[in-house]
Amino acid sequence: MRIKELILQSWDALARNRLRSILTMMGIVWGLTTVVLLLGYGESVSEGVLNAFLGIGNSVIIVWEGQTSMQAGGQRAGKRIHFKYEDIQAIRDEAPLVRMVSAEWDDGVAYKYGDRVISIQTKAVQYPYGEIRKLNVDEGRYFDESDFTEHRHVLIFGPNAAKKVFGGRDPVGEHVTINGATWDVIGLLKLKIQDSSNNGPDNENAFMPFESMSDINDERDPHMFVFQPVTPLLHKAALAQVREVLARRHNFDPRDDKSSPEWDTVDDTKDIKQFGLALQVILGFIGVLTLGVGGVGVMNIMLVSVTERTKEVGLRKALGARRRDIALQFLIEALVLTFAAGAVGMLVSVCLAHAIPPMPLYSAMYKTANHEGDIFLKTSGSVMLTAFLILTAVGITAGMWPAWKAASMEPVEALRYE
C-alpha cells in the first residue's frame, strides 16, 4: 500500500474520533511549544552571555609584566620583568602567528574641564587596539595613524566616562587639560555591553595614543601587550611565540608563565560556549519530558484504537496483509496525529515568541533603542529543526508499541474478538 493512501486512511481514522484526537493533540501542542520556547530561550541566553563576554574583543590575549619563578641565564628566580617600548616591534617582526598587537599603558588620569577635575581610568594604546578590542565610535572618529606618529594630544571617551567629565554636553570637539597641556576630544564610543574587562569596561575609560603618553608623564614603556592570533585555533602557539620573544629580550625562561602572566580569552570563549550548550541541553531535556507526556497520550489513544479495530486487523490479515503492512498503518497513524499537532505547536510557539516582550539580561544602564543585550525568545532554524527531530522521535516511540501489538495479532483470535 502506498504511503499516500496510508496517510489518507490514517487521517480518516482520526477524523472519525474527532474529539478524542483533538484532546490528544493538545498534549503534543503544549509539549512542542514548551520545547521550542525553552530551546529558544536557551539559545538567546547563551548568545547574550557570549556577546557580552566578547565585548572585550574577538580572540584577545593580554600579557602582563610579572616576576620570574624559574632560574634563567644564571639569574635567580624572583626578578621583576619590565616591558620595553621596543618589545612591541620585536613581537611584530618575530611572531608570525600574531595578527595584530598593541602596547597598552593603563592608569588613572586627572582631567581638568572648566573648574572641575575628574580622575578617569585611561588607556594609552596603539593603532591596532581599536580593532582588537572592538572600540566602535559613535560620534567623531577613531585615531588616525598620524595621531601616533605626530604625538597628537587627542582623546576618545567611553560614554560613561564622558558623562563624568562633560555632564550632558557633547564631548566631541571639547578640550580638557592634563598636567597643564590641552587635549582635544575627537571621539565618543558606542555604549557597549561588556562583562569582561581589563581595569574596567570601555564605557568607563578614556583612550589616548600610546606615543603621546610620554607628554604627560615620564613613561614610554607599556604595562602590557594586547594581541590577536592569526586564527583562534593557533592561540596557544601565538602566545608561545610572544613569550619566546619576550623571554629572549628579558632573559627569562619562556616556559615560565609567571614571568609574563596572560589572559587568554579564547579559552574563556570555549568555556562559555560549553556552558551555553549545556544550558540548551538541560532546557531541551525539560521540554522533552513535557512533550513525552503528550507522547504517552498518543500511545494510549493508539492502543485504544488497536483494541477497537481488532476485527479489522484480523480481517486484513486473513486476506493476506503482512505484519509489516499492519504495523506501518498504525505507526503512520500515530505520526499523522503527532505531526498535525506538531504543526499547530510550532505555529503557537512562533506566535508566543513574537508576543512575549524582550527580557533584560543586563542592568538598565545598558538599555539601548534596539534592545541590545535583551533576551528574545528565538525561533531560529536550528531551534525549529531540533524541535522537529524531537517530535519525530516522540511520534515514532509513541506509535511503535501499538503498531507492534496490532501486527502481532493472530487472525483467528482477532476475528473472534468481541
Image (cartoon, grey):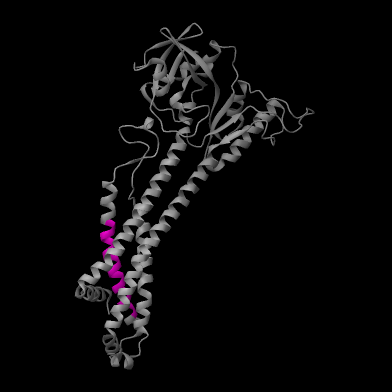
Location of the N terminus by quadrant is: bottom left
Picture residue at 50% right of the left edge, 31% below the top: 197
Of all residues, the one furthest to the top in this rendering is 180
Relative to 151, residue 252 above or below: below
Is residue 264 shown to the viewer in this render? yes
Residue 362 picture quarter: top left
Picture residue at 49% right of the left edge, 47% below the top: 275
In front: 81, or 107? 107
Per the rendered image, the range of residues in magenta is 327-346
Of all residues, the one furthest to the right in this rendering is 74
In front: 145, or 160? 160
Q: Position of residue 353 (x, y in %)?
A: 29, 49
Q: Position of residue 94 (x, y in %)?
A: 62, 30
Asked whether residue 335 is drawn in magenta, I would say yes
Residue 45 picture quarter: top left
Residue 315 picture quarter: bottom left
Q: Position of residue 178 (x, y in %)?
A: 49, 10
